[in-house]
Amino acid sequence: MPAPTNKALARILVVDDDRDMRVSLADLLSEEGYRVEACQTGVEALVAVEKSHPDLLITDLIMKGMQGLELLRASKQRDPHLAVVVITAFGTIETAVEAMRLGAFYYITKPFKSGDLLLLIERALEEKHLRTEVQRLRREVQSHYHFDRIIGKSAAMQRVFALVDRLKESQIEVLLTGESGTGKDVLARSLHYQGARKEGPFVAINCAALPEHLLESELFGYVRGAFTDARTDKKGLFVEAHGGTLFLDEVGELPLTVQAKLLREIEDKEIRPLGATKGEKVDVRIMAATNRDLRQAVADGKFREDLFYRLNVIEIHLPPLRERPEDIPLLIQHLMTSSSQPTRVKRFSADALRILLNHSWPGNVRELKNTIERALVLCQEEEIAVEDLPPSLIAAKGSVPNLRAAFLSHQSLADIEREYILVGMELTEGNKKAVADILKIDRKTLYRRLEEYGWKDHHEPETDKGPQH
């Protein structure tokens, strides 16, 4: 919907069986710049609602045939976002309450001043615009956090996807584990926005970011006078998340005193703000995430065992990037195409790609994303070169930590060679000449290896169809 100040784009439907009132209202609104359609009966108005999709309906309460409240109810069934103003000369408290219950924006009695009605219409259109914008943003958020946007073709990520798919409609507690930067926050939001609570709020708190006394008041809230600086009541995050999801990031950092109160609130489904004498029921799904080994923390007495099992109904472990190197090319491509940075970059040079593939990525996907964003900003050409990468990556380009992991997992040399060649073919979109040059091998050797691997030339450039003699 257009901004409410753009009157020429706002459509208003006027319904009144009194011809003089109908014409008077239509003329007033047309002179103000609105697009106006007038109807004599409720039946005609319903047809117009379905056909013209007005932004605002102004209806008389008492009419021949279909009455104003009946029209209000039927119109809202056809378009829940339609703004409705009811006008009448026979106003009572009962009818006003019923009109508002059925979804009317306002109820105004005759006689009324033109200026009052115009102000009311402007406010009604503004509220409709805000409601429509909220719906649009909600759909955009849901799309942004769709499971399809979580990248990974590795076996480890496929196991994550399979588990997540089974949890989409569930509302049980989930514990997300994994190193920092593996995407636990993104996965938590995806579970929320693709699940049964997607229309409710998603409220997140980093449990490691606040000291103990502030953390407790943030989670549970407080009442005025609970402590020296409590001058007003404050809603806690449990209340703000009512009907939705509360995401406790870095839950392993919670102090033991807060853990005890958190456990009680989760089990009772009731929170008691600091200083309050009675509790308040809340309906909240808890998701938690940690990069710590909570089982070890339980053994060390640093995390309550009962809270651990309460949070850990289902555990989803996100593997570090170094354990799924085959996902790096996909992530690079995704991060480049989804970046909001203005850039002319189209690709990475072979040497730059080799550095990215050989890096251990201790910061995981977050580190990779920052690296890509930095390169897109600094690069002035169509191809990202080595010098566009962070100095720390360039200095470490000789290390191959993924090979260490391969050795420890007892992969054969043939398996490593196969994977390395196929990754090269994927990153160069099937350019055999480029792959042979990077690997420093004869192209005939490369062709022979690819034939053994069953490689299909889906992306091979027209200029490189076969061996060069």
Image (cartoon, rainbow, N blue to C red):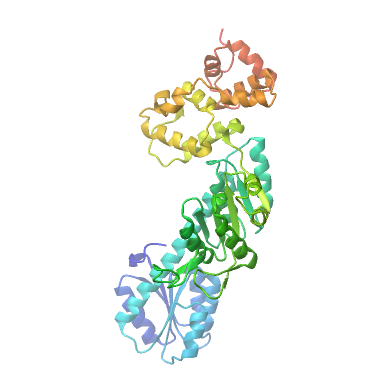
In the drawing, does residue 186 fall left or right of residue 118? right
Q: Is residue 24 left or right of residue 233?
A: left
Rendered position, 381 above or below 276: above
The location of residue 278, given as percent across then percent down, is: 55, 75
Please give the name of the residue rendered at 50% of the width and 55% of the height, measured from the top-left corner.
Answer: 205
How many tags in the picture? 0
Residue 454 drawn at (x, y percent): 68, 22
Which quarter shows the C terminus? Answer: top right
Q: Nearer the viewer, residue 410 or 468?
A: 410
Q: Quadrant of residue 20?
A: bottom left
Is residue 457 at least partly visible in the picture? no
Q: Residue at x 37, y 89 (%)?
A: 110
Q: Position of residue 319 (x, y in %)?
A: 61, 38
Q: Is residue 421 above or below residue 195?
A: above
Residue in the picture at 68% in, 47% down: 163
- In the rendered view, would you say 308 is above or below 60? above
Comparing 59 with 30, the one in front is 59
Q: Relative to 27, is 294 above or below?
A: above
Q: Is residue 101 visible?
A: yes
In the rendered image, which quarter contains the N terminus?
Answer: bottom left
The one of 437 and 377 positioned closer to us in this rendering: 377
**Residue, far top:** 469
Residue furthest front as drawn: 301
Q: Position of residue 105 (x, y in %)?
A: 44, 77
> Could you say which is closer to the camera, residue 437 or residue 360?
360
